[in-house]
Image (cartoon, rainbow, N blue to C red):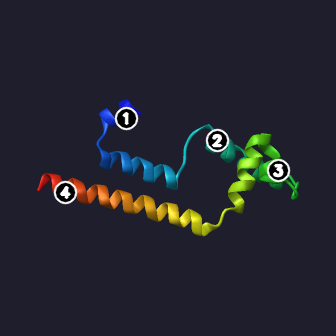
Amino acid sequence: MREAQQRCDSREFVEWWVEYQANPWGEERDDLRIAQLCTLVAHGLGDKKAKVSDWMFDDQKKKQQHKTRKSSVVDMRKVLMAKTAMFNAMKNQGKKKG
């Protein structure tokens, strides 16, 4: 974290944070994408009952089930908060320059 703070200012950090909120990356996300692809292939081969969770590890299944139960309102609130933080960082950056 310290290295990230040395390499980018608060505005850039918030931009990365907003990007991650909108499009997460990492192993868990990659595993989810592979599971989605496997489900698509299974459907194409005739297994219409195949689900994404069929291709995920047990701990990932629990996380995914929990996530799908979350309200879209909560997700939208996170995006709104992230965009507000980015706007405020940009606004404060402009004040420092001016």
Q: From the viewer's perspective, is 87 left or right of 60?
A: left
Disc nearer the start of the sequence (2/1): 1
How many other residues sit within 10 Å of disc 4, few (<14), some (14-19) or many (≥20)?
A: few
What is the x, y in percent for residue 17?
44, 49
Q: Which residue is mark 4?
A: 94
Disc nearer the start of the sequence (2/3): 2
Residue type beneath disc 2: Glu
Q: Residue at x 19, y 57 (%)?
A: 94
Along the line of sight, which residue is nearer the eye, 79 or 30? 79
* SS assignment at label 3: helix
Q: Which is more foreground, mark 2 or mark 4?
A: 4
How many other residues sit within 10 Å of disc 3, few (<14), some (14-19) or many (≥20)?
A: some
Residue type beneath disc 4: Gly
Q: Which residue is mark 2?
A: 28
How many other residues sit within 10 Å of disc 2, few (<14), some (14-19) or many (≥20)?
A: few
Q: From the viewer's perspective, is 20 left or right of 6?
A: right
Disc nearer the start of the sequence (4/3): 3
Q: Residue at x 70, y 60 (%)?
A: 68
Q: Residue at x 80, y 41 (%)?
A: 58
Q: Which residue is mark 1?
A: 4
Residue type beneath disc 1: Ala
Q: Which is more foreground, mark 4 or mark 3?
A: 4
Q: Residue at x 52, y 52 (%)?
A: 23
Q: Which residue is mark 3?
A: 42
Q: Which is more foreground, mark 1 or mark 3?
A: 1
Residue type beneath disc 3: Ala
Along the line of sight, which residue is nearer the eye, 17 or 40? 17
What is the x, y in percent for residue 28?
64, 41
> What separation in Å lies between label 2 and label 4 (alpha carbons)?
37 Å
Q: Which is more foreground, mark 2 or mark 1?
A: 1
Disc nearer the start of the sequence (1/3): 1
